[in-house]
């Protein structure tokens, strides 16, 4: 079975990312859940993946907990769609909007297609770089217990989730600096569509 390695990056924090290995037969809801195991955010918030081109332009929407309007428009549902259905390119991109009430935008890019390793459990977190930014919503949830210290791989052993102190302050000082450093990325983001 093929294994897709996705790099999941916060749109405004390109130095914070996760690399996740997913079996090709997985559904979008499984990728959604794995992203939030690695961030500590609550996975039950209304969210959508959009099939994207190289400029991150939003195409077909694949939704979780869609609004009635989206249901009436027969939007695709994450739990019904396998990842392989929309992998047309070895560097396929998906624009991902988490929590439409307090949205965070992610860029999800296929970076490798691997062969399944014997004895390895999938999905699997391959790499974790940087601390995720806090949100008012996420700050009220504990860090996910699903990810343990020995699962961190490679260069960074940063803990997932949010600190207990300054719980509702938005970002900590490191995150603010990271946001200011992203000037180039912000210029490129002018090509993104803003409608949800």
Image (cartoon, rainbow, N blue to C red):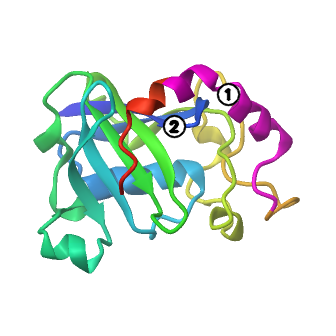
Q: Residue at 63% across / 49% down in the picture? A: 148
Nearer the observer, disc 2 or disc 1? 2
Residue 63, image x and y in percent?
Answer: 27, 61
Give the vertical position of 133 relative to 140 (above or below).
above
Which residue does the numbered mark 2 point to in the structure image?
11
Q: In this view, does 8 lie to the left or right of 70?
A: right
Q: Residue at 61% across / 60% down in the picture? A: 144
Residue 80, image x and y in percent?
Answer: 16, 62
Can residue 195 be seen in this snapshot? Answer: yes
Q: Is residue 68 left or right of residue 164?
A: left
Query: Is residue 146 one of those drawn in magenta?
Result: no
- Which residues lie in the magenta part? 169-187
Which quarter of the rendering shows the N terminus?
Answer: top left
Which residue does the numbered mark 1 point to in the structure image?
156
Of residue 14 and residue 101, the one placed in the foreground of this image is: 101
Residue 127, image x and y in percent?
Answer: 53, 30
């Amino acid at each position: 079975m093929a294994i897709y390695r996705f790099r999941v990056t916060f749109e405004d924090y390109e130095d914070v990312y996760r690399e996740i290995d997913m079996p090709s037969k997985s559904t979008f809801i499984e990728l959604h859940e794995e992203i939030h195991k690695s961030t500590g955010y609550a996975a039950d918030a209304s969210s959508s993946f959009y099939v994207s081109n190289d400029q991150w332009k939003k195409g077909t929407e694949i939704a979780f907990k869609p609004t009635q309007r989206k249901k009436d428009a027969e939007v695709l549902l994450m739990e019904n769609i396998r990842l392989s259905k929309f992998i047309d390119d070895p560097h396929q991109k998906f624009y991902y909007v988490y929590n439409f009430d307090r949205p965070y935008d992610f860029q999800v890019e296929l970076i490798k297609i691997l062969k399944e390793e014997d004895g390895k459990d999938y999905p699997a977190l391959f790499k974790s770089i940087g601390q995720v930014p806090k949100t008012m919503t996420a700050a009220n949830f504990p860090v996910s217990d699903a990810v343990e210290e020995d699962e961190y791989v490679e260069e960074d052993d940063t803990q997932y989730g949010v600190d207990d102190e300054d719980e509702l302050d938005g970002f900590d000082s490191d995150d603010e600096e990271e946001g200011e450093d992203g000037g180039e990325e912000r210029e490129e983001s002018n090509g993104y569509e803003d409608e949800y």
